[in-house]
Image: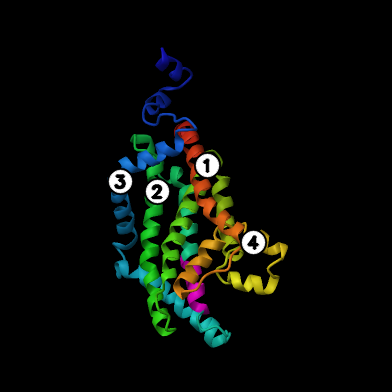
Amino acid sequence: MTDELLTTGLNSDEEKLLPFHSKVSIFRAPFKLFSNLSSNRYLVNNLVKRDLNQKYNKALLGYVWTLLEPALLASVYYVLFIIIAKHSEPNYPMLVLLGVIGWGMFARILNGTVNSLTSNSGMIKQTNLPMEVYSFSLAVTQLVITAISLLIVIPFMVHLEISPSINLWMLPVSIISLMITAWGFGLIFATANVLFPDVSHLFRFIIKAGFFLSPIMWTYEMMIERAGPDSVYLDIIMLNPVVVPLTCMRHAIEGTTPDFETVHVIYAALFPVLSYLIGSIIFMTTSRGVVTRL
């Protein structure tokens, strides 16, 4: 009787997809998503390997590009800011490079997660694999690429005579925070992107605008110096969830401690958690309903 009620009003294609992607309650959503990813670890690993191979396998230099791209960027920043602009801080190109690497990972994960359902529509309609696997494997792929890209910072540290310090723990924590925030936030809008393709166009604009509104070409310390610690503009800027992680990445490499207000640290720590909780609930409870629209 229950199956009859569930299939009432559905066409034949929808009835075939029904057992593939079952509904999940709001309260179980975060746990169910985590369980699905945990039970499909092998699949996630294979998808990550596939994505990496597709990206670099046919390239002449292969995985060397993960280091070559940031190296070329570093060369451009050095010429632009140190030689041409004669920037007073010799480590400024390194700070910009760290910002570009961190933001690049965040932007790619966010954009990829928002488009994860539409870009994997063929697989989703033909298999009963959890739909969150595709976006998570993309996020892990970008995490691996970012981890390799950060090796380019080592020559900067040698040149600037910067030794690794105990503050280096902030680097992996900040990167994981950026990854979870981008992935969770992307899950919130992934379903909406199936129904309204305008969402994808909107996020492309948000990502472009976010490049200038995030501490990439500028630093948190520059903002404090120019706006003042009590400026209302500083409070607005700190609403950007990537400000604290990107700043902590830089301080982790420099071996210094960032001077944040406690409320900003708490906000930055809670944002990834809330992004995951809200994103998992919305994705798990709504993605099932749009499978037939793919």
Taking the spot 43% from the left edge, 46% from the top edge, the residue there is: 119
Label 2 secondary element: helix
Task: State the residue position of label 4.
Answer: 237
N-terminal of the pair, mark 2 or mark 3, is 3
Q: Kindly indicate whether the residue at mark 2 contacts the one at mark 4 (C-beta within 8 angstroms).
A: no
Amino acid carrying mark 2 in the image: Phe
Q: Which residue is mark 2?
A: 136
- Among the two numbered marks 4 and 2 on one chain, the one whose residue lies closer to the N terminus: 2
The Cα–Cα distance between marks 2 and 3, rounded to whole angstroms, is 10 Å
In-front residue for pair 149/268: 268
Q: How is the image coloured?
A: rainbow
Of the residues shown, which amino acid type is indicated by label 1?
Ile
> In terms of sequence position, does the residue under pointer 3 or pointer 4 come before the other?
3
Circle nearer the N terminus (4, 1): 4
Residue located beneath label 3 in the image: 41
Magenta residues span 92-101
Q: Is residue 123 visible?
A: no
Pointer 1 or 2: first along the chain: 2
